[in-house]
Image (cartoon, rainbow, N blue to C red):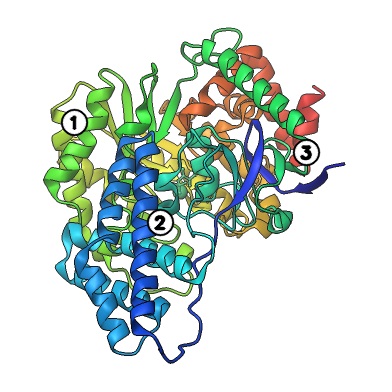
Amino acid sequence: MPEVVRGLGVSTGRAAGRAHRMARPPVLPPPAPVTDAAHEISVATGALAAVAEHLERYAAKASNRDARAILEAQSLMAADPALLESVEEGVGSGLGAAHAVDAACAHHREALLAAGGYFADRAGDLDDIRNRAVAAVLGLPMPGVPDPGHPYVLIADDLAPADTANLDTGTVLALVTEKGGPTSHTAILARTLGLPAVVACRGAAGIGDGTWVSVDGGSGEVEVGVAEDVAAGIQREAAALRDRRDIGQGPGRTADGHRVPLLLNIGSALDVGPGAAEGVGLFRTEFLFLDRRDAPSFEEQVAAYAAVLQALPGRRVVIRTLDAGSDKPLPFLRLPGEDNPALGVRGLRTSRTRPEILDTQIDAIAEAARSSDAETWVMAPMVSTVGEAAGFARRARARGLSHVGVMVEVPAAALHARRLLEEVDFLSVGTNDLGQYAFAADRQQGELADLLDPWQPGLLQLIAMCAQAGREASKPVGVCGEAAADPLLATVLVGLGIGSLSMAAPSVPGVREALGRYSMAQCEEHARLALAAGDPDEARAAITGA
Ligand code: PEP
Ligand code: MG
């Protein structure tokens, strides 16, 4: 009988396959005297050669062009003669193979950082090479995303944005992490890629490499030790379901024809995809600039925004200005360290100390808007006061942008939704952060995931206030947090009066299908039941029994 371990299902769908773990970075052994320098050099350079070869093989198999280019460049770095020379020097000065690799990589890392710009951005790649080569010297499994040579379920402690650049949906079937919450990077990434995912799964720690597992990204159940033929059956069903879902097309609407635009959450033009998107409800511009040491130039930004706007002529594209800080560190802002970064200088607040960054960004958005036929909307993240909304609106309108809005991510903003709409043209409710701040629960914390459940009636009440303010002002109010991607909850949001829903592309068919099953009056009944419930489970049960 398979053993069942449970976590939080954050990206629906089922998948099954062999589990493979993302190995942790190796720890250096205590230094030991070198007795055979030639041997140490040959072990260290052999490890680097193995890493270069591994990365080259991985690059050849990557289905994504950008991932392939990154891996090819990284492979060349691992084989760089200057790096090998530093390793020899390290051994010459008395270091063993692992320590010599570590020291050589640290030395070259410093040089890259000092060179700045593009070179500094590659410093992280060298860390990865260091981890892989030290692991090879010590005979440990390669850290980073594994490459077992067949499709597999990825098990990890947690996934950072940098870990995911190489994630190939051709081989990764599902994600299971020990940490993370419903709005953590892993969850957002999984929904973007359309991969079933379970986070906050403590039992994942005990899943051995190569074990057959099945993952249910809806219920959060992971069965460990399933039979191989059962796993194959689950994979066949998943493929059949994907085919059926791809058939549904067209704009979002309720069963009685009430239009609800279903927009996309994207991080770059690549996420727009070839499908007929109704528009973009959240363009997370900071995703273009993660891990950068220098601010992106005006020209670079114009090109990045224009690439998205030009892909969607005549459609709405809501561009969010940089949301830096807390879970999205942007080193080029050089923000001081903070004890509570989620409560610190993040989102729009960064413009208090670095106003020129926001000004350049708005200039670049306005310039890109002039070169396209898309309907360009712009909004600021982490707005807490009416004064902040007014200041942002002034700045954006002065540059000719005519659809200016703010995100509602802080309870104070929801409580003042009506006043905010006197200053701006639209609101977009970011339920990920609104849940975090309303419930005082870190969105990255698995232990507090129940408080971050978007069905929490307290969160729904805040969303209802925003929707009501929009109705009174006759101005659009949408939801772009992960709550919008839950098909049943989408009917509740529409019933509350939310006018558009924005989500990762793979979630659109499920939400479209759910909305199409209910009339507006039924959605309103769902909203009433969910608001009246005492907790998320009661809210869900009230509706599924309705
Ligand atoms: C949110 O907070 O709901 C949101 C959409 O923004 P992000 O997830 O990028 O913080
Ligand atoms: Mg947010």
Residue 539 picture quarter: top right
Q: How many marks?
A: 3
Residue 300 picture quarter: top left
Residue labelled 3 has its Cβ within 8 Å of some atom of ligand 1: no
Q: Position of residue 30 (x, y in %)?
A: 50, 87
The tag earlier along the polypeptide, 3 or 1, is 3
Q: Amino acid at mark 1?
A: Ala
- Label 3 belongs to which residue? 226
Q: Amino acid at mark 2?
A: Lys
Mark 1 crowdedness (10 Å alpha carbons): few <14, some 14-19, many ≥20? many
Q: CA distance from mark 1 to mark 2?
A: 26 Å
Q: Quadrant of the N terminus?
A: top right
In the image, residue 98 above or below residue 119: below
Residue ID at (48%, 48%): 409
Residue labelled 2 has its Cβ within 8 Å of some atom of ligand 1: yes
Q: Position of residue 544 (x, y in %)?
A: 78, 25
Give the SS element for disc 2.
loop
Q: Quadrant of the C terminus?
A: top right
- Label 2 belongs to which residue? 328
Residue ID at (41%, 89%): 35
Residue ID at (64%, 56%): 178
Q: CA distance from mark 2 to mark 3?
A: 37 Å
